[in-house]
Image (tube, coloured by chain):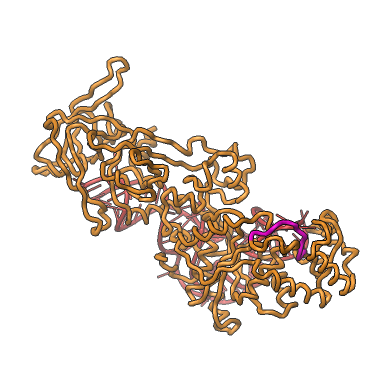
Chain colours: A orange, B red
Amino acid sequence: MSTEEPKTANFILEAVAEDLRSGRFTYVRTRLPPEPNGYLHIGHVKAFYIDYLTAKHFNGELYLRFDDTNPAKEETEYVEAIKEDTLWLGIKWDKETYASDYFDRLYEWAIRLVKKGLAYVDDQSPEEVSATRGTLTEPGIESPYRNRSVEENLDLLERMKNGEFPEGSRVLRAKIDMAHPNIVMRDPVMYRILKVPHHRTGTKWCIYPLYDWSHGQNDSMEGITHSLCSQEYIIHRPLYEWFLEQLDEFRSRQIEFSRLNLTYAMMSKRKLRKLVELGVVRGWDDPRLTTLRGLRRRGVTPQAILDFIARTGETRNDSWVDMAQFEACIRDDLNKHSPRRMAVTRPLKLVIDNYPDGQVEWMEAVNNPEDAQAGTRKVPFSKVLYIEQDDFREVPPPKYHRLYPGNEVRLRYAYLVTCTGVTRDPSTGEVTEVHCTYDPATRGGDAPDGRRVKATLHWVSAQHAVPAEIRLYDQLFTVERPDEIEDLEQIINPHSLEVLTDCFVEPSLAEAKPGDRFQFERIGYFCMDPDSTPGKPVFNRTVSLKDTWAKIEQKQG
RNA sequence: UGGGGGCUCGUCUAAUGGCAGGACGACUGACUCUGGAUCAGUUAGUAGAGGUUCGAAUCCUUUGCCCCCAGCCA
């Protein structure tokens, strides 16, 4: 991973270091704990990064353990996607495991607790269990089945496992304290009956453990020293510790951090799925989504994502990171690494009246001013060009330095040209062509007499131009915190996608491949989309360049 | 209103009893063959009230606000 480590250690690193100093642990092992029930999004990256960083920092190990305890929701398809996305991020794990690898051993451990009188089979219905749990302010009521004999519990558990009872008819519960102020400790359910085939164990099991009766045990079995998770698990920590203490097994330590909240991003898997199902987006890899696949298609690099997470830091504060912060990281990375190209998104014909008909000159253009190694390329120049509609005004507003009648500008890497007039459509009066003259002495872009121009325009030679489609993206939502709104339709930005089908790009782009990233000069960063066809490349705008003029113009109204 | 967690510039984050600093954003300006990049500068914060201390964001007391938990989800 190319991201630098934060200069100051975060509170997790400090805690781990202390555990090593005190001798509580002699090594470090963390785990990435995805549930294979959906695609990874940027929120997961924070957890992944912390686990990765912590292991790496102490020269420890990182396990990738799929939390596949609920066969009703999980699929192999997601396992593969998660692995692929994790690798794409540049995070490698030392060992790949599954919660389901431990089903047998976990069952043995459950029997141990039953034998110690610390777990019992409850015959209550889900509704009864729920109704007797109590409330936030009132204690729960003990189950009438709570004090069954060990023998009866053992027999019932065995029969649950053998599939003798219907779903929902019985559960195994830990026997702790129905009056505990922490609701998690009120005889939590350990196993439920689920007659659903599992993506890895098939039909072998019809009871499946719940998170609380699986995660900590798996951590212990794997010798995970630090089980790093998000804040919402804090209240589960007493139970996490209770189980390992009663079992007298290796005591992994759970440490919580606050999850990532990003403005304008949707993180809820449920709602993400809904967006896909409703057709609001075209799939899990829609470039407007902050899924890793969406970000990848959009053109965001793994380095930018990791850098963003690192810059954001790890704390336990509730926080909302501004999307602008993420965009800054994206620009930072892309600026350094993206080759520059010229592309015209909304073409306007520019005719150089005094330029020889039929002449073509190949101008030398720098590939990346930020990277001397990137070299140069040749770009064809001729009498008829396309420029950006925004780069010409018949009547220039204040502070407008681009092309307007009588004004001289530079065509990037080519010549200085002066606008002489326009050609109009006789019926509509619309400007169809802009005319100019060039100064042959300014080849390459510099005037021998030292005169300066205030604007440099990008352009594409009409006869050499490659037609292209360009997709411009804006925030998918109209509100900063879309996850908080249930009615999606209310908050969808109808202008989140703008497709420009009549663009022209410079000829070198004909050889680009899907996934290639470029900076289109003066516009933004773009990534070639897999929808591209040989005759017509498609580019996604990853993020725009900072646009000072747009800001000035906005202020002018 | 039970239990738990949290509160530092607009946002994110440092400062571990000793100059409240950085990043992003915003705003100036310089420079520029990208109105990009870069550089310089400005703006702006310890939730409130008490207390301990030579000295408090940090320790104590107290108040307020925000978040999480009543799945046989994770």
Vertical placement of A460 versus A433: above or below?
below
A193 in magenta:
yes
> In the image shown, does B34 or A287 lie closer to the viewer?
A287
- x and y percent of residue A230 in the render? 61, 62
Most extreme residue toward the top is A427
User: In which quadrant of the rendered image does the C terminus of chain A lie?
Assistant: top left
> In the image shown, does A463 or B10 lie closer to the viewer?
A463
A177 in magenta:
no
Vertical placement of A326 versus A490: above or below?
below
Residue A466 visible = yes
> In the image shown, does A294 or B39 lie closer to the viewer?
A294
**Left or right placement of residue A295 versus residue B67 in this view:** left
- In this figure, what is the number of numbered marks? 0
- x and y percent of residue A202 in the render? 68, 61
- x and y percent of residue A495 in the render? 48, 36
Which residue sits at x=60%, y=40%?
A488
Snapshot quadrant of residue A125: bottom right
Snapshot quadrant of residue A118: bottom right
Q: Which residues are magenta?
A: A189-199
Which residue sits at x=74%, y=74%?
A108
